[in-house]
Image (spheres, helix red, strand yellow):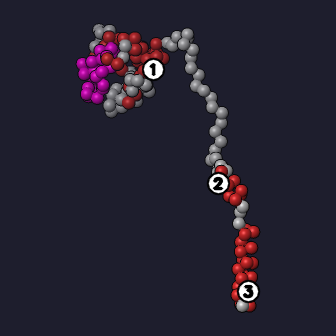
Amino acid sequence: MRRKLVIFAIGLAVTASLVGCRPSLAEIHQTETAAPTRTPRFTPGPRTPTPIPPTDVPIPPEQRGEILFRGQGACLSCHTVDGSENPNGPSAVGMVERIQAREPDADIRELLRHAIVDTNAFILEPYRGDLMPTNFGEIFTDEQLNDIITYILSIQ
């Protein structure tokens, strides 16, 4: 009997010590609902919005052409604007000189329009004609084509 009493007393002491170490239900609930704390790797600075020109301020045609050349037309995928060569297409810089050397009496604006709209009709050597999209005459308006041509002429 005494042995049972000693075992019971030891079990009671161990249980009492464990109960003191165990968090309360309120503490458990608090840790489950608290947001995890993380240290960010960097603190982003304030965002500066990109200025958008007011709609009442006209954008010059060469800037509109550059936007189309770099964006919707995706011309930079084959043509450069820094004079370096690309294996897929001639640089836009110097293109006018090469066209005029080939067709000295032609209207350069009309030749550029023709080269953009009917891509296989006017190909500068040594480039292939089957790389350039053939639907630019459908996706660009006349004004947009004029803007692209004005941009090309402005970077010569």
Q: Quadrant of the N terminus?
A: bottom right
Residue 114 image position (x, y, % from top left): 29, 15
Mark 2 or mark 3: name the one nearer the start of the chain.
3
Mark 1 or mark 3: name the one nearer the start of the chain.
3
Is residue 25 something that shows in the picture? yes
* Tag nearer the camera, 1 or 3: 3
Q: Which residue is mark 2?
A: 32
Label 2 – label 1 distance at C-alpha: 55 Å
Question: Are circles 1 and 3 on residues that touch, CB within 8 Å?
Answer: no
Query: Callout 3, which amino acid?
Result: Leu
Query: Callout 2, which amino acid?
Result: Glu
| Residue 82, above or below 28 | above
Q: Which residues are magenta?
A: 112-137
Residue 39 image position (x, y, % from top left): 66, 49
**Pick the front one: 86 or 55:** 55
**Pick the front one: 110 or 25:** 25
- 107 is within the stretch colored magenta: no
Q: Which residue is mark 3?
A: 5
Residue 119 image position (x, y, % from top left): 28, 21
**Pick the front one: 35 or 150:** 35
Outermost residue toward the front in this view:
1
Under tag 3, what secondary structure? helix
